[in-house]
Amino acid sequence: MTYQPPTALPRDFLDQEDVHRALVAHDFGTVFRLARERAGISYSRIATECDIKPNRVGELARGIGRITTFEKIIQIANALRIPGHVLGLAAQPWETDSPGHTDETGHPHVRRRTILQAATTGLAAALPSLHRPEPPRRITPAYVNQLRARAARLRRLDIVLGGGDTHRVYLAEVQHTKSLLRDALFTGDARQKLTSLLAEQAQQAGWAAFDGGRAREARSLYEESRAHARDAHDDDLYGNALAFLAYQELSDDRRAAVSVARASCATITPSTPSTVRALLYERLAWACAVDGQVTDTERALDAARVALDTTEEDEPQPDWSTWVDYTELEIMTGRCWTELNRPLRAVPVLTRALDRYSDDHARDKSLYLSWLAQAYLTAGEVEEAARHVNRAATLAYGVASQRPAQRLTPLITHLRPHANIGAVRELLDRDAV
């Protein structure tokens, strides 16, 4: 008979709408509180089975803090018998042995609930688990290459979907790779290659977490990625992990962010691929611009351009940096000049780049348009600023990303005093709907 821990949550409890919402959001504090109130499972028992200090369980239940580490999430899932698909994880071994087990779409209430949730929170909430073939008994370098190609395909989701949609998909990939590193047998240098892939996957999951408003989880993933890159002796991914950390640090400590960005560029060697060099210098330029360092911003932008200018024919580039090109560099240049309050420099370069930037990249184009709008606003061109904010808001509609709203909301606030201008009034009328 399959062992059932004393904290196993009843099926009817898991089917409750507020419980399901909390699980999908990884809001385990709410789950703990509801489990005590409705299922009679004490905090002390949860603490014992989940290996969490009792006072910590109480704090989580009161909304203080969150569980963000992957190992602890899996431990909670196993202790409470939460099906993996609900949390965006692979199915756990106990699931196929559970009494009355059905797949994640087999229960009509689950199907109905999942479809409704897809309409409100996005694609990945409806399809948190992607098909994954069984791995071979021994992991070879060739198999790791197949997994890396899979990661490249999944990265394309980020072009059209926000982090609120993709986060659980990327997190499941991280979990699967961790399980292979823990349990599988390896040939040749396959373990080192898979560790490098894990660093890459953790960065993608961290970016999705950041885009979806999960800043603490993003930081944890970036730090984890840095450790895996170090273990894999992958200098390019190590530098990129630092660049991600610098990008996020800007909201807390600008000077510290610049230091971390400089450290990321210090990882560059003569063998670093040109797009990786350009990416790291772009991130340094942005950190310097946010910190108001004009000269260092220009120097970093120049270094990024030199990196692209010196790209050798047929030079291999990692998939995670191939999006860095001259258009992206122009956009970053315009963003930096906007941040430095140089609208006369920012507007032409942003306009030129965005004219050839596809609307299919809705989230990113919405964000970039917000900097163009900010540049116009700095220059006193209120009508043009309102027009571009309106267009950015149109593109951002329905995208599961926190960042467009974070950019557009303060711009709309600055435009409100100009409600007598037609373009501003149109924007404000739309914002009120």
Image: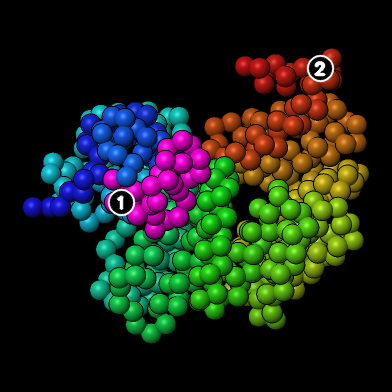
Query: For the residue carrying disc 2, how many other residues have a C-alpha within 10 Å: few (<14), some (14-19), or many (20+)?
Result: some
Q: Which mark is first along the chain, 2 or 1? A: 1
User: Can residue 374 be seen at all in this image of the molecule?
Assistant: yes
Question: In the image, which residues are magenta?
Answer: 45-73
Residue 47 sits inside the magenta stretch: yes
Q: Position of residue 103 (x, y in %)?
A: 22, 43
Q: Position of residue 384 (x, y in %)?
A: 82, 30
What kind of element bears circle 2? loop
Foreground residue, 260 or 91?
260
Q: What numbered label is drawn on residue 210? A: none
Question: From the viewer's perspective, is residue 415 above or below residue 159?
Answer: above
Q: Residue at x 33, y 41 (%)?
A: 43
Q: Residue at x 40, y 77 (%)?
A: 191
Question: From the viewer's perspective, is residue 33 above or below residue 204?
Answer: above
Instruction: Answer left or right for 361 relative to 54.
Output: right
Query: For the residue carrying disc 1, how many other residues have a C-alpha within 10 Å: few (<14), some (14-19), or many (20+)?
Result: few
Please identify the dominant SS of the magenta region. Answer: helix
Residue lying at the far bottom of the rendered structure: 188
Residue type for callout 1: Thr
C-alpha distance separating marks 1 and 2: 59 Å
Residue type for callout 2: Ala
Residue that mark 2 sits on = 419
Q: Position of residue 337 (x, y in %)?
A: 85, 49
Q: What numbered label is drawn on residue 48? A: 1
Q: CB under 8 Å between callouts 1 and 2? A: no
Q: Image quarter for residue 316?
A: bottom right
Q: Residue at x 48, y 45 (%)?
A: 66
